[in-house]
Image (cartoon, rainbow, N blue to C red):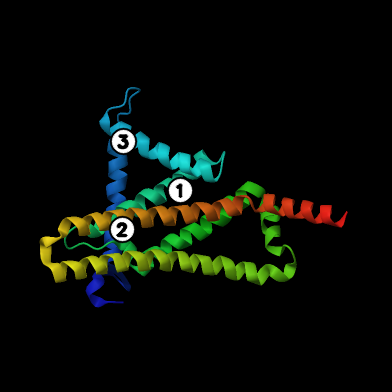
Amino acid sequence: MNAEAVVFSLGPLAVTRAVVTTWAVMLLLAGGCAILTRRLQLEPDRWQTVLEGIVGAIHATIEDTLPQHGRRLMPFIGSLWIFLAVANLVGILPGATSPTGDLSTTSALAALVFLSVHAYGLTSEGPRAYLRHYLQPSPIMLPFHIVSEISRTVALALRLFGNVMSLETAAVLVLLVAGFLVPVPVLALHIVEALVQAYIFGMLALMYIAGGIQSQQRLGRNHASTHGASS
């Protein structure tokens, strides 16, 4: 661990800048939600209209990917998208770095996605039906399914970390070489790429959860196709 990244220590636990920034983002989002939702009206004002537009867009995207599960997945996927968008954009502030540019942060987010996939799958189908798909088409495939689950989780963490870190590094290098003559294009590129990376991570999480929820449906289709071929 880089000693310069440690802000303070709680006994043997070192609290880094990424952790402090993550806490700050969470407090900012919690406070913003509390303020924006305190006085909701039937005739929305400007801020409520923007808030409803964001919520509606996220809900529609979830429904397009996994129909009839929008309300159920909205708390997790919506929170994940909004957190990632804000966390990625923190890097545009002078002297600040995005917490998603730290591997520990992206690993924690990937672990949450990993746990959510199985939590939604188990609650949707029941433990027995959900775990059965890991033994298809043959029990010998179980190790390969496990390796696949772990590898895609690791890839999810590394992908976001690498993209955000490279984005911030490229922005710093451009500013060092060109000075502050091109701040607007660099800033615009940073904003667009930060939002794109948040969207991709959230979509991958949504697709993984959809795969977990629909695993029993795939199992049923495979069984039906096998039975049809044998008959």
Check disc 3 and report the residue beneath it: 50
Front residue (pair 76, 221): 221
Give the mark nearer the N terminus: 3 vs 2: 2
Q: Which residue is mark 2?
A: 22
Q: Is residue 193 above or below residue 71?
A: below
Q: Amino acid at mark 2?
A: Thr
**Residue 9 locus on image (x, y percent):** 27, 70
Task: Mark 3 or mark 1: name the one nearer the start of the chain.
Answer: 3
- Tell me the crowding category of disc 2: few under 14, some 14 to 19, or many 20 or more residues within 10 angstroms, Cα based: many
Instruction: Write down the quadrant of residue 160 in the picture.
Output: bottom left
Labels 3, 1: front one: 3
Q: Evaluate if marks 3 and 2 touch, with contact meaning CB atoms under 8 Å apart.
A: no
Q: Taking 131 as reference, is 6 above or below it?
A: below
- How many marks on residues? 3
Looking at the rendered structure, the secondary structure element under dot 3 is helix
The answer to whether one can see residue 37 in this image is: no
Question: Where is residue 97 drawn, in percent x and y?
Answer: 24, 63
Q: Is residue 187 left or right of residue 127?
A: left
**Residue underneath mark 1:** 76
The residue sitting at 46% across, 64% down in the picture is 156
Q: Residue at x 19, y 68 (%)?
A: 174
Q: Secondary structure at mark 1?
A: helix
Residue 100 position, x and y percent, is: 34, 62
Q: Amino acid at mark 3?
A: Val
Q: CA distance from mark 2 to mark 1?
A: 17 Å
Along the polypeptide, which appears first: circle 2 or circle 1? 2
